[in-house]
Image (cartoon, helix red, strand yellow):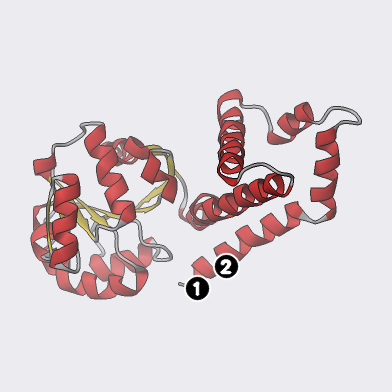
């Protein structure tokens, strides 16, 4: 099995690193292309794969071709490679805002296409990816792609309308979480904790809290109640967050991300 990556930025590099770490394919079976010779050499040095500036060469070799380019460049890349794509090839898009109908129009109405939405925690092997195949992708091919995507975190099949929601609730939300961690640390610093230590404690608290949700299966609200002792310190903090509208602010932020995605 050969893998191709058109575009090899941070996300593509995270995907490749996960695949190599799990030994799903060998380095010699992965090919990538970037815009410049300098970046191609950096990728080759960092990952040990073949990387060039030749999109056509990569497209022709790949059994599974990842499209890891920005939305504004997708049309030009499609025009460049669509006539040389091998029969039976599976295209895997991580391009935000470009739905299956658009991708099929640009790359071919008979092409096997899987639209995905990974997120940046893939860089540390803790990503979550929404996966939406078109009607031409076989169950075996879907399983193979899920295996590739699970090499750097979790991955699940969703319907296409839900994929735009995935882009907000998991794709954009790390930025919200980073803001929250920074704010937690700032509060601790204001009360005398050294900043480096404050970031460590706040980050580990968020990591552990997320793990509790995933591993216990207990509703987040119930977990919150477990921390809030009667007349205790935590319920006082929760009261402030509720008064300041934390829930509605986060909900509005998620919906704003979805609205923006639909305009891309």
Instruction: Name above or below for residue 108 compared with residue 127.
Output: below
Q: Position of residue 234 (x, y in %)?
A: 80, 35
Give the distance between the C-alpha atoms of the residues marked 2 and 1, in whole angstroms.
Answer: 7 Å
Residue linked to disc 1: 263
Q: Is residue 88 among what the camera can see?
A: no
The residue closer to the viewer here, 251 or 87, is 251
Q: Position of residue 199 (x, y in %)?
A: 57, 43
At x 37% / y 65%, what residue is drawn? 101
Which disc number belongs to residue 259?
2
Q: Position of residue 258 (x, y in %)?
A: 56, 62
Whether the residues at callouts 2 and 1 have beta carbons within 8 Å, the answer is yes
Please tell me how crowded label 2 is: few (under 14), some (14-19), or many (20+) other residues with Cα within 10 Å.
some
Picture quadrant of residue 226: top right
At x 61% / y 47%, what residue is drawn? 181
Q: Residue extending furthest top?
A: 216
At x 61% / y 65%, what residue is drawn? 256
- 249 horizontally vs 46: left or right: right
Instruction: Name above or below for residue 254 compared with residue 102.
Output: above
User: Mark 1: which secondary structure?
Assistant: helix
Picture quadrant of residue 91: bottom left
User: Mark 2: which secondary structure?
Assistant: helix
Instruction: Name above or below for residue 212 compared with residue 57.
Output: above
Instruction: Name above or below for residue 78 compared with residue 2.
Output: below
């Amino acid at each position: 099995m050969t893998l191709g990556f058109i575009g090899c930025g941070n996300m593509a590099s995270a995907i490749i690193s996960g695949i190599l770490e799990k030994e799903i394919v060998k380095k010699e079976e992965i090919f990538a292309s970037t815009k410049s010779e300098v970046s191609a050499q950096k990728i080759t040095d960092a990952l040990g794969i073949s990387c060039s500036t030749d999109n056509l060469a990569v497209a022709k070799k790949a059994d599974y071709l990842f499209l890891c380019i920005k939305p504004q460049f997708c049309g030009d890349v499609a025009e460049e490679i669509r006539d040389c794509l091998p029969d039976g090839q599976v295209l895997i898009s991580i391009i935000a805002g470009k739905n299956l109908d658009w991708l099929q129009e640009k790359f071919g109405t008979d092409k096997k296409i899987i639209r995905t939405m990974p997120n940046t925690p893939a860089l540390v092997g803790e990503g979550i990816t929404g996966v939406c195949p078109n009607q031409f992708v076989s169950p075996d091919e879907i399983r193979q792609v899920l295996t590739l995507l699970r090499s750097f975190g979790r991955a699940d099949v969703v319907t296409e309308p839900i994929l735009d929601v995935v882009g907000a609730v998991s794709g954009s939300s790390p930025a919200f979480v980073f803001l929250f961690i920074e704010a937690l640390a700032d509060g601790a610093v204001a009360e005398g904790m050294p900043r480096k230590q404050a970031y460590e404690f706040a980050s580990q608290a968020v990591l552990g809290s997320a793990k509790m949700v995933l591993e216990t299966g207990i509703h987040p609200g119930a977990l919150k109640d477990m921390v809030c002792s009667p007349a205790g310190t935590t319920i006082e903090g929760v009261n402030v967050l509720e008064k300041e509208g934390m829930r509605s602010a986060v909900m509005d932020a998620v919906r704003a991300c979805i609205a923006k995605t639909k305009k891309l």
